[in-house]
Image (cartoon, grey):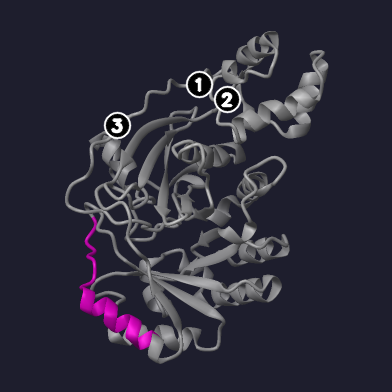
Amino acid sequence: MSLPIVETVESAAETTPAPASAPSADRRPVLSATADEWRRWMVDRGHPAYRARQVLDWVVRRRAVPFDAMTDLPRALRRELDEEWTVFGTTVAYHDVAPDGTDKLVIECRDGRRIECVLMAEGPRRTVCISTQVGCAMRCVFCASGLKGVERNLDSAEIVEEVLHLRNLLPPEETVTHIVVMGMGESLANLDNLAAALDRICSPAEGLGISQRRVTISTVGLPEKICKLAAMDRQYHLAVSLHAPTEELRNELVPVNEAIGLTAVLEAADVYFERTGRQVTYEYVLLSGINDRPEDSRALARLLADRHAHVNLIPYNPVAGLPYGRPEPEAIDRFVATLRQRGISVTVRKTKGRAIDAACGQLRRRLQPETERTPR
């Protein structure tokens, strides 16, 4: 699943190649090992176990990239680390910055596959939007991320590295405050790796100490996985990518719905609310003339009337080669008014990154050779 989280306009900003070199394939990324594994590695080589905590602290909190920058470690240990490990297993392939300060990175994994992630600043908030898969299998008809299908899941270390790459763009006195899992891929299709990554990021002892309540996980709606997430006893905010108020229209826009059904998605979301007490958000991408009509807003209001729900309307970001358009402002205002008149909580997502290909999947597509863009 992938949502257009920020707006794309007529011209894209210059895409800047990153200076970082690719990590050596024969060295293991630091975050691919647990804290326990690191302690064992240190002890096995005759170093105090507490050195493991120092290494992880340098990477996660102190932003060290070369091991040589870890100045409170003995020089001999730093040489050993450099022989067997690499700080990151992923590299920043491209970096776009919009005039409003929004940063978008294309991250290259060790196998050459690429993903996207975004850093958005507004007031004191520093929000990162991260991916969970290379591509997406959900095939939402309006989305750039799924045009080539899904290639693979990201592992937990790759997901954590997205957050750290984005965090490292911030000044030393700033850090990430919020996480939205709305990038490339269907988040819950990779739930185990995502949960492990978030547990690490949110950990006060081993991560950035971000509150679980400041994490939003978006899904197209996989009922069994939603219930599994609810049973994990976390406080993450759930966002369900609804996009249509009827079975027929959702089958057209979100083809996987034919095998799942809108009722099952809503019932699973109800379970999540009942188990966690966290209000569920329903994401709704507005497509001009398709799901933004008065009858659509009335049907959506009926669907959510008896639920403790919030609707987040997302005016569509056009994708080159796809036949969908952004609604006129009047249509958006009319849709909002209808929902509010019927007692439904609703907001319209504020656009960010106006001068870059910031809708998820678009920048990666633009950077790919033309021969690789054809949908399969």
* Amino acid bearing label 1: Pro
Which of 98/376 is in front? Answer: 98
Q: Quadrant of residue 59?
A: top right
Label 1 near label 2: C-beta < 8 Å?
yes
Q: Quadrant of residue 39?
A: top right
Where is residue 300? Give x, y as percent: 42, 83
| Residue type, mark 2 in image | Val
**Residue 145 picture location, percent across and down:** 38, 50
**Going from the N terminus, do you reach mark 2 or mark 3 first?**
3
* Residue carrying label 3: 16
Residue 30 falls inside the magenta stretch: no
Report the number of numbered marks.
3
Residue 362 visible to the viewer: yes
Viewed as shown, does residue 262 lie left or right of 104? right
Amino acid marked by disc 3: Thr
Q: Residues within 10 Å of mark 3 (few under 14, many from 20)?
A: few
Q: In the rendered structure, which segment of residues is drawn in magenta?
A: 322-339
Most frequent secondary structure within the magenta stretch = helix
Q: CA distance from mark 2 to mark 3?
A: 22 Å
Question: Which residue is under mark 2?
Answer: 87
Picture residue at 36% right of the left edge, 57% below the top: 4
Q: Position of residue 154 (x, y in %)?
A: 54, 41
Identify the residue at the far front of this view. 173
Residue furthest toward the left?
10
Alpha-carbon neighbours of circle 1 within 10 Å: few (<14), some, or many (≥20)?
some
Mark closest to the chain's N terminus, 1 or 3: 3
Tell me what residue is drawn at x 32 percent, y 49 percent.
Answer: 358
Circle 1 residue: 23
Q: Identify the secondary structure beneath mark 1.
A: loop
Displayed quadrant of residue 104: top left
